[in-house]
Amino acid sequence: MTDSTLDPEDRKIVTLARSVRARNGVPEGAAVRDENGRTYAAGTVALDSLRLSALQTAVAMAVASGAKSLEAAAVVTEAESASAEDRAAVRDLGGPGTPVLLAGPDGTVRGTVAAG
């Protein structure tokens, strides 16, 4: 998948995820888009008492802001795939068909998987 074939709204959440990762110096950045087109971007949370991946944090932010569903999610990471826990968080709010875009630190989308 090249940047030129990526939907502009999907490109936006990849850019937001990449920005959070770079700005905060965290291992992962993520962003989700809800059913109304609102976006939520977050980084990894690594406290002694609380550990959340970037994607789990973005989903939690969407839920806390009143989102009822998700259209898409993106995670910028060095990992080769989205974890089962990350896909589960997206699935819980967006359903099994919600696409999760996986991008490298340079923002290049390496693939898309369904949350389910």
Image (cartoon, helix red, strand yellow):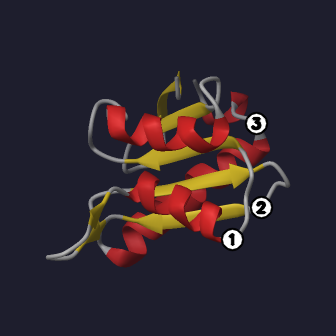
Looking at the picture, which amino acid does disc 2 mark?
Arg
For the residue marked with disc 3, what is the amino acid?
Asp
Q: Position of residue 13 (x, y in %)?
A: 63, 53
Q: Is residue 107 left or right of residue 5?
A: left
- 68 relative to 64 in the view: left or right: right
The residue identified by callout 3 is 7
Q: Earlier in the sequence, mark 3 or mark 1?
A: 3
Instruction: Give the residue at x 48% y 55%.
Output: 30
Q: Secondary structure at mark 2?
A: loop
Q: Which quadrant would residue 63 be assigned to in this image?
A: bottom right
Crowd band around label 2 with a 10 angstrom C-alpha radius: few (<14), some (14–19), many (20+): few
Whole-percent x, y for residue 104 in the image? 38, 42
| Residue that appears at 33% across and 30% down | 81
Amino acid type at circle 1 is Ser
Is 84 on the left or on the right of 13, as rendered? left
C-alpha separation, residue under disc 3 versus residue under disc 2: 16 Å
Q: Which residue occupies the foreground of this view, 75 or 64?
A: 64
Q: Residue at x 64, y 31 (%)?
A: 95
Nearest to N terminus: mark 3 or mark 2:
3
